[in-house]
Amino acid sequence: QAQLVESGGGSVQAGGSLRLSCAVSGLNFSIYPMAWFRQGLGKDREFVAAVSFEGGRTHYADSVKGRFTIFKDFAKHTVYLQMNKLEPEDTAVYYCNAVRAPTIPEIVGPPWGQGTQVTVSS
């Protein structure tokens, strides 16, 4: 059964950095585009970033463009989200999943994992 396990969240001050990890198992990691989403308190889950199946193409939400970087490690079956210049507005629970395409954030993977909390203080 496919499984997604997110980690790497924490509490940082504005301007700081974090790297999130999403370990993927039970899913052919090499053929699926992968994406990160986030859900702030009282808000809907929103798209953050996506990477193509081969890792060569990326797509970002305007709010994180230039600050966040998504990439795949095929040897570790893990997708990462490097987050720099964090802002209080980035505070949310972050989730990963397989998607239809980098620009089509339709979920095609397993049920959501537990997510990882990111808290950014001003």
Image (cartoon, grey):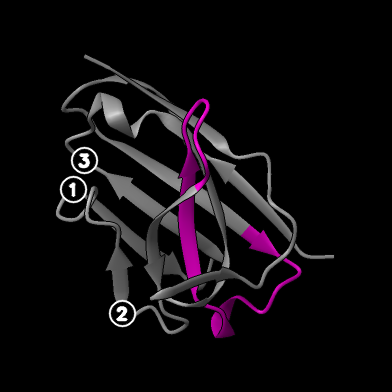
Picture coordinates of residue 28 (x, y %)?
66, 79
The kind of residue on which mark 1 rests is Arg
Q: How many marks?
A: 3
Picture coordinates of residue 43 (x, y %)?
49, 34
In the depicted structure, whether residue 40 falls above or below residue 68: above
The kind of residue on which mark 3 rests is Asn
Residue at label 1? 67
- Residue at 16% across, 27% down: 15
Residue at label 2? 57
Question: Picture quarter containing residue 56?
Answer: bottom left
Q: Residues within 10 Å of mark 2 (few under 14, many from 20)?
A: some
In the depicted structure, whether residue 122 falls above or below residue 78: above
Picture coordinates of residue 85 (x, y %)?
17, 36
Of 54 and 107, the residue lying toward us: 107
- Residue at 37% across, 52% down: 81
Q: Is residue 49 left or right of residue 64?
A: right
Residue at label 3? 84
In the depicted structure, whether residue 8 falls above or below residue 79: above
- Between marks 2 and 3, how big is the CA–CA gap? 20 Å
Quarter of the image containing the N terminus? Answer: bottom right
Picture coordinates of residue 35 (x, y %)?
47, 63
Q: Earlier in the sequence, mark 1 or mark 2?
A: 2
Label 2 SS: loop
Q: Are marks 2 and 3 in contact (CB under 8 Å)?
A: no
Q: Are marks 1 and 3 in contact (CB under 8 Å)?
A: yes
Magenta stretch: includes residue 28: yes
Label 1 SS: loop
Quarter of the image containing the C terminus? Answer: top left
Q: Earlier in the sequence, mark 2 or mark 3?
A: 2
Q: Earlier in the sequence, mark 1 or mark 3?
A: 1
Residue interval drawn in magenta: 24-45
Q: Is residue 86 left or right of residue 99?
A: left
